[in-house]
Amino acid sequence: MRRLFWILLLAIGFVSASAQSLKLFCSEMKDIAPKPQAVVMDFMERYFSSLKTQKQTTIQTKMADDKVFFRKGSLSDLSHVSDTMPLSISLVNKHYEVTWQKDSQPFINVVFPAQYDLLLGMKKDEAVSKLKNAILASPQRTMQTAVPSDLILTDGSIYKSQRDTLGLASMNDALYYNKVSEKYQPVYDKAYLAYSAANLFHGLIPNKDYRLYVEQSVYGMKTINYTLSLRQWLNYCTEWGLKVFFAVEEQREDGLLALVIAQSKELGFNHMLSVVIPNKFIIDKNAVLKIRMTPYIPTNNVKNLFQEEYVNHKRIKWQ
């Protein structure tokens, strides 16, 4: 099982034992941390601060319900964390392990699930309702420029880099390049619509910023509609560290029907997008990409759900 590690060799916080809040991490560290790591830090401070005023039986019940537990140390020991203690934050088998050391030995070891509703401190309905604003609030990203080192010649003159798949071989993170004058350039050509669309949603085409008309699922079997730019969506994916998987479901006369999964292993959720991409998108900067979005799918449900979508959408044509 792959293990994701965030290791900090020096302590990165100072504890305040005030009744109002428990500060485990300095604000400067949270400001420069990747978004998922900052979410985990905020969760720990918020969660354990909320327990400080509860009765012991209530604390035990809540932690058991949330699957949060101490393998080493206790809640009261958090007040004794100092700025000389090395700290590690590890993601192992869909659970976080946070460990402080003292005298080269584990002092506190706390474990909790990588589950977005727990870590964000909100139920799915609330997270879904706030998604649009989260996308709009994401800062401007820097477009990817580095050429992958693992390119393999495929499909005639096309070079491909692929490192991961999601359930089906066609649902992957592949990037596509042409070789021109000994330089590799991302494929963006009407002769290769599927490869071009994949590169577009992986953020390889810096000068294209299409409008996205989004029909987003919300609670109560309802939907909300809004318009974003492609750049705003890519900014959001970058800020939240989402890994993008792309597959073409169908090549139709009017364009491509594609499926996009934006996955956060660190926070345990996936956004699934069914996208209609018109054939003219290569040459028409005003082309509108139409999206049906199902947000915040738990990691353990996403493979079955997108496989169902992959089969069912082949029978449905929507404009």
Image: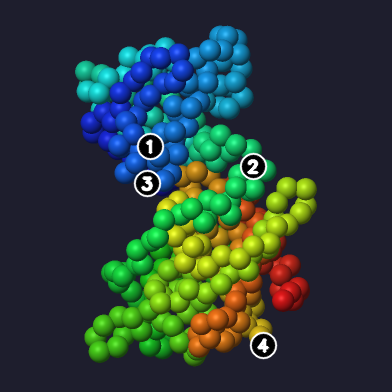
User: What residue is at 55 percent from the left and 81 percent from the top?
Assistant: 286
Q: Nearer the viewer, residue 280 or 252?
A: 280
User: What residue is at 38 percent from the left and 79 percent from the top?
Assistant: 186
Front of the two marks 1 and 4? 4
Q: Nearer the viewer, residue 142 or 298?
A: 142
Q: Which residue is mark 2?
A: 126
Instruction: Name the disc covering residue 90, or none.
Output: 1
Q: Position of residue 133 (x, y in %)?
A: 56, 52
Q: What type is the residue that disc 2 sits on?
A: Glu
Give the left or right position of residue 317, taking residue 234 as reference.
right
* Circles 3 and 2 in contact, beta carbons < 8 Å: no
Q: What type is the residue that disc 1 sits on?
A: Ser
Q: Which residue is mark 4?
A: 253
Instruction: Name the disc covering residue 34, or none.
Output: 3
* Circles 1 and 4 in contact, beta carbons < 8 Å: no
Give the spatial CA distance, label 1 vs label 2. Answer: 27 Å
Colour style of the rendered protein structure: rainbow
Front of the two marks 3 and 1? 3
Image quadrant holding the C terminus, namely bottom right
Give the spatial CA distance, label 2 vs label 4. Answer: 39 Å
Q: What type is the residue that disc 4 sits on?
A: Glu
